[in-house]
Image: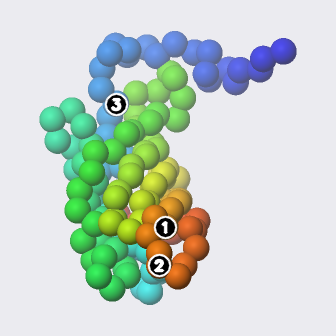
Amino acid sequence: MKHIALEQMQERTADPGAALDLAALTGHWVNTNSSPSLIRHIQLEPARNQLIMRVSGAEPGLADWGVTQVQPFSENAASGLAMALSASFDLGGAECLLQGYVVKGVLVIVSFTLVKDSRERSSSFGKEFFYRVS
């Protein structure tokens, strides 16, 4: 038997082809930890019906991760508001998948870093918290 949450069964009242409202995700986000393990800042900006992410890393040599396109997600099928995201960065010797969501004004980012080169470190998982400054 397959179970579906009630909010997943609701139909979106807005135009189903309309883009998600990105307001909850966009802006300049700063890590709540002054000595972060992976990410210092995140910039999320809308551009031509898509969301673009720029990451400032915390590790030496990886200060600027560059930009990538973000896949935004709503909380449920009936919502038109983007509250979560997924993005991927190729950092040369490592690939980093970032997934996140906004809760109570805080951006929670979960990272999955896959080491692809011969560096003496393991692939890793992490979670960091960000507050919006603009």
Disc number for residue 91: none
Are the residues tagged 2 and 1 within 8 Å (C-beta)? yes
| Above or below, 63 relative to 22 | below
Residue at 39% from the left image edge and 39% from the top image edge: 72
Where residue 63 appears, as percent x and y from the top left, is 27, 77
| Above or below, 92 relative to 89 | below
Q: Is residue 130 visible?
A: no
Where residue 103 appears, as percent x and y from the top left, is 52, 53
Q: Earlier in the sequence, mark 3 or mark 1?
A: 3
Q: Amino acid at mark 3?
A: Leu
Where residue 33 appears, as percent x and y from the top left, is 47, 80
Which residue matches tag 3?
20
Q: Earlier in the sequence, mark 2 or mark 3?
A: 3
| Above or below, 60 relative to 107 | below
Classify mark 3: helix, strand or loop. Answer: loop
Kindly report which numbered mark, 2 or 3, lies closer to the viewer in this rendering.
2
Q: Quadrant of residue 96?
A: bottom left
Cα separation, mark 3 vs mark 1, equals 33 Å
Where residue 125 appears, as percent x and y from the top left, is 58, 65
| Above or below, 7 relative to 41 | above
Which residue matches tag 2?
119
